Amino acid sequence: MDVEDGHVLAYCVGGLVLDVPAKSLPALVDWTLTEARLGQPRLHRNGRDGDPLLVLTPAALERYGLPTALSDEERRAGRLPDSHKAVRQLTRADWKLTRRGLGPWARIYRPAEGAKRHCVQLCIPAWNALDAREWDDRNAPRLPSMHPADLARYLGAYAQRVMTPRGTAAVTGLELMTALHPPTRAEKDPVTGAFTRALNEDALTAVHDVVECEVPDEHPLLKGRFARHHLRTPAEMLMEEPYDWCRPLTDDECMRQYLVAIDVNMSFAAAANGLTVGLNGPTHLTGNPPFDPSLPGSWLVDLSHVDLSRVRVDGRPVDGGRLPSPFTPKGERPTGPAWYATPTVAYAVELGFEVAPVEAYVRTRTGRYLDAWYKRLRDAYVTTMADLGVTTGLGGAEFLDAMARSRQSDPVMALLVGAIKATAKGGIGKLRQRNRGQVPYHEPWPALERETWRPDIRAAVLANQRIGLHRKLMKTAAAADLYPVAVGTDAVVYPSPGPTPLDVLPRTPEGKPVPGTFRLGVSPGMVKHQGTRTVLWAEEQFEEQGGVFNIANHIKTDPAAGEGE
């Protein structure tokens, strides 16, 4: 919504521009629902249609009596006070606001009449609704100067390919899970003919009991259990996190001129694909239960005996000392019993080692809850990359050249790629949303009331991401005697004789990637070039810092690589 030459204009998806006659904020809401009839069809037959989203420019804010910037007090509160003129206008017109009030993302509604909703959402970029960390280019912000038509194209494409934004990209990522798997459906009573609410078996339908080892430190369950600054150990807390690992280079590796960083596309979304997660509450298994890879959950087990140097990959040994352990985020070998998610324990079995859990918390009703979510985000990502000239049919040098050109081809679609990635990563993070000062330490915070507050599912995805990456590291080491020197989340650094991934990633005599290793390409789970530095640069960095530190996310010299996930 913008104002030009005194006229309010609505720039819509597809290039449509509407003249807006509304003179007040309540009239604008009425016009949106009755005349413009904006919105989005539901993504699942048991879900609900997407509410209209109005994005207000500073000129539109002034026209409808809203400030172009929040005061310090309003910014801390995240909303305008209830005494503000615009809020009182809505109240007099019988419109309501949700508990978060009239803030950067505001919902204005009247109670639904049957299946028909009366709700409009406002997005106000001038109040930092579109945070640059998720929606913009942090290095060269574009949103402040973007024309309203381009902004409508950007957010409209996001709505069509992902869903109508519901707040931050992370919030939208979580809402997308619910939109694709609604917890309830309407069911007709065969006797009375009346419709009642029934639960969907493939969805998260209730708030279940939580498990001590799975919750963050500030959770009410831990009140009085530990001292205020106690650091919980792996035997007390499930620590499934992405990699943050680095090691010194060997003498032979220092003889190679370059360090090449590759980055896994949409790694968290790819890890969610095909993953079986729990849909109900935990069942506590005690007395040294046998490990069952079909039961998602958390297992207390000692994996310190797993020695990678004893593993054979396709009949070949690997040097375990130059690989991170698959069982800890820092890549260190575990020293005793610790809590692990099911994918991590299953990988120890896959490597050929026996496991003997002490106890476990598992879920007995299971499903591939995140499959539809992954497919929606995968299709959005691949379609948008195709708009930038990077298609799934490209490989090798063609793919690298297309990536190098992509960020200059269409700046609006380049922003959309970043927003889709932020949606995938943020949605997984929201499954264990922490208390960010909303309430005192060890007191319940609002996120705990959601059916989708499931730290066990987040842990399973992160474990699967780390294990999937380690599996490729092992395959690459066995196939080409090639070992990483650093891994940061989804970025892997290899010493290389040349400056591109083509100089280092192993290939078959026919020129194809070795099966099971990293493959260049645009699809989620495949890799792209993140950047290249020299070995001399790394040694200088280590000397300046006084020791080895993780250089994986500092190698971003390729402008097409963008920011890692």
Image (cartoon, helix red, strand yellow):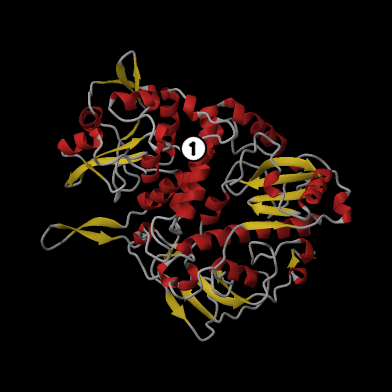
Work out whether 410 lies above or below 424.
Answer: above
Query: Residue visible at 46% across and 63% down?
Result: 455
Residue 400 image point, x, y percent:
69, 36
Query: Residue visible at 70% across and 50% down?
Result: 492
Which residue position is annotated with label 1? 135
When asked about the image quadrant of residue 189, the answer is bottom left
Work out whether 63 lies above or below 456.
Answer: above
Kindly give the residue lying farthest to the left in the view shown. Answer: 192
Residue 295 image point, x, y percent:
48, 71
Total marks shown come to 1
Q: Nearer the viewer, residue 321 or 191?
A: 321
564 relative to 227 in the view: left or right: right
Q: Amino acid at mark 1?
A: Trp
Work out whether 540 lies above or below 2.
Answer: below
Residue 49 image point, x, y percent:
29, 42
Query: Residue visible at 61% across and 45% down?
Result: 564
Q: Nearer the viewer, residue 45 or 419?
A: 419
512 relative to 257 in the view: left or right: left
185 relative to 358 in the view: left or right: left
Kindly give the residue lying farthest to the top in the view shown. Answer: 5
Query: Can residue 268 be seen at all in this image of the molecule?
Result: yes
For the residue labelled by badge 1, is the local secondary structure a helix, a strand or a loop? helix
The quadrant of the image that shows the N terminus is top left
Count residues near mark 1 (Cα–Cα under 10 Å), then give few for <14, some for 14-19, many for 20+: many
Kindly give the residue lying farthest to the bottom in the view shown. Answer: 287
When asked about the image quadrant of residue 499, the answer is top right
Work out whether 455 lies above or below 408.
Answer: below
Query: Can residue 117 be seen at all in this image of the molecule?
Result: no
Q: Nearer the viewer, residue 317 or 431?
A: 431
